Amino acid sequence: MGRKKIGLAAMAALALALCVSVFLLTTYALFSDTVETDNHLSAGTLKIGLYQTSMTGNQIGTGGTFGDYSESIPSGGRDLKTYDGKVFNIENACPGIYREAAFEVRNGGISTAFGLTLEIVNAAADVQGDAASSALLSQMRITVSWGTDGSETFLLSEEEKTVDLGTVTLPENMAENAVLSSFTVRAEFLNTAENNGAQGGSVSFDIRVTATQVTPSA
């Protein structure tokens, strides 16, 4: 809608609570350590960290026009392993409102190649059976972007989605906390003819990032 004024009939006063669930997945790699005739296998650990580095978007002003929105993120990024707030939190949203968060996957002490996936899970109306919240699920568009041209778009009402972010191969002697991969997630309230049905709705969803060790083929 650009900066065009929004008519009152098109306004939908929504309480939108979008949350991110972050976890650190641990897998195991086997290393061989031979001492004389004793063969000993010890387990290494795959560790990653997930950080939020920015939040941008738009917001509606008192004059009924859209303006830019940005959130202050701590220097060095927000460690989502310890952060207990909501990454996306939009109150009184109207059609055309969006937020876009940038994330980084960082080295937590690993030395192997791994595949990275992102899942949108637990998308649901905050009040079960609420018609407005159910309508809002079908009017929220999620866009995941990564790399130079990777992008996938879907509605929050669709079944749980898994996005393959590709394989990351670590160079030797990579520093701990070095950036391994980056991606963005954009949540947008679409402007449709059905917007009025979503007034007063509230929805939430979780983002799950998983690192899985890549093992050589037999």
Image (spheres, grey):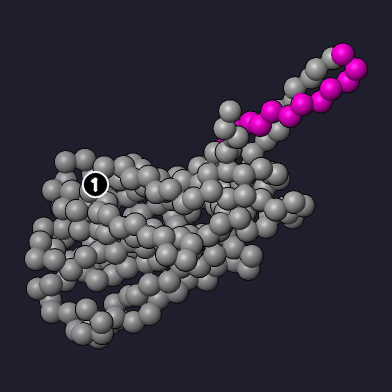
Q: Which residues are magenta?
A: 24-37
Judge whether residue 26 can be spotted in this image.
Answer: no
On the image, which quarter does residue 214 sit in? top right
Q: State the residue lying farthest toward the front.
A: 218
**Residue where numbered disc 1 is placed:** 158
Judge whether residue 128 can be spotted in this image.
Answer: yes
Task: Specify whether 1 is left or right of 42.
Answer: left
On the image, which quarter does residue 112 sit in? top right
Label 1, secondary structure: give it: loop
- Picture residue at 25% right of the left edge, 64% below the top: 189
- Picture residue at 75% right of the left edge, 22% below the top: 41
Q: Out of 167 and 68, give the one closest to the viewer.
A: 167
Image coordinates of residue 152 in percent, x first then y, are: 34, 57
Image coordinates of residue 149 in percent, x first then y, are: 42, 65
Q: Out of 69 and 213, give the one closest to the viewer.
A: 213
Image coordinates of residue 169 in percent, x first then y, are: 62, 49
Q: Amino acid at mark 1?
A: Glu
Q: Is 46 situated above or below 64?
A: above
- Picture residue at 10% right of the left edge, 61% below the top: 194
